[in-house]
Image (tube, rainbow, N blue to C red):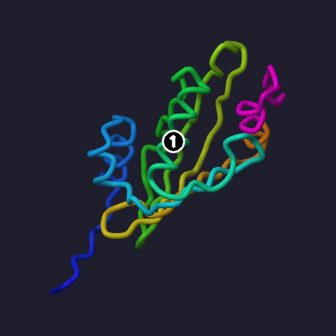
Amino acid sequence: MATVKAVITPEHVKEAYAALASGDTQKVRQYWADEMVWQVPGHNLLSGWYFGLDEFLGFMGTVGQLSGNSFQMENIAGQVIVTGEYSADLTRNRGNRANLPDKQMDIEVVHVLRWKDGKVIAGKGAIFGDGATEYDQFWSNSPAVTPPTH
């Protein structure tokens, strides 16, 4: 029996994110592998590795809980780069911490996804410059985020 190789397109990547945002587990499983791994950058309570789709979805649930469901990712480059088994996209990630309306985050993030058979098997985010500090402060237990001065 011949193996069918899935071709990843920018539209496929966008559909995967839409499935994730929908919260519909059946849709999510169409694009995100059960055995996937995800790495969260930084030095905060969310940083580290998440092994398997269930842990990853738990992480996403924690993001929603800690942000009072205000966390949002907006594609800002208008393009998704796809090459071979990898995709990369640039997003603007924003949110407020639950019960701390003055604690806000507004950063740019590159997500790199690795694909196999049409599903994400690995992913990570990269945050640059002062955004890394802002990200860590946002997810920390400190009462405020000190935005960089430009």
Which secondary structure is most common in the magenta stretch?
Answer: loop
Farthest residue in the bottom direction?
1
Picture layout, residue 121 above or below residue 107: below
Q: Is residue 96 left or right of residue 81?
A: right
- The structure residue drawn at horizontal position 75% and vertical position 41%, both measured from the top left corner, is 44
Give the magenta-colored segment's residue range: 134-150
What crowding class fits label 1: few (fewer than 14 Cα within 10 Å), some (14-19), or many (20 or more)?
A: few
Quadrant including the N terminus: bottom left
Q: Which residue is the site of mark 1?
A: 58
Q: How many marks?
A: 1
Residue 52, percent from left and from top = 48, 57
Q: Is residue 115 left or right of residue 106?
A: left
Helix, strand or loop at label 1? It is: helix
Picture layout, residue 76 above or below residue 113: above
The magenta stretch spans residue 144: yes
Q: Is residue 55 left or right of residue 101?
A: left
Q: Quadrant of residue 31?
A: bottom left
Q: Amino acid at mark 1?
A: Gly
Q: Quadrant of residue 94?
A: top right
Which of 27/77 is in front?
Answer: 27
Which of 112/40 is in front?
Answer: 40
Picture layout, residue 90 above or below residue 69: below
- The structure residue drawn at horizontal position 57% and vertical position 54%, both measured from the top left corner, is 50
The magenta stretch spans residue 95: no
Residue 137, percent from left and from top = 78, 33
Picture layout, residue 38 above or below residue 46: below
- The structure residue drawn at horizontal position 37% and vertical position 53%, both measured from the top left corner, is 13
Quadrant including the C terminus: top right
Q: Is residue 149 left or right of residue 66?
A: right
Residue 118, percent from left and from top = 31, 64
- The structure residue drawn at horizontal position 34% and vertical position 40%, both measured from the top left corner, is 18
Residue 76, percent from left and from top = 50, 39
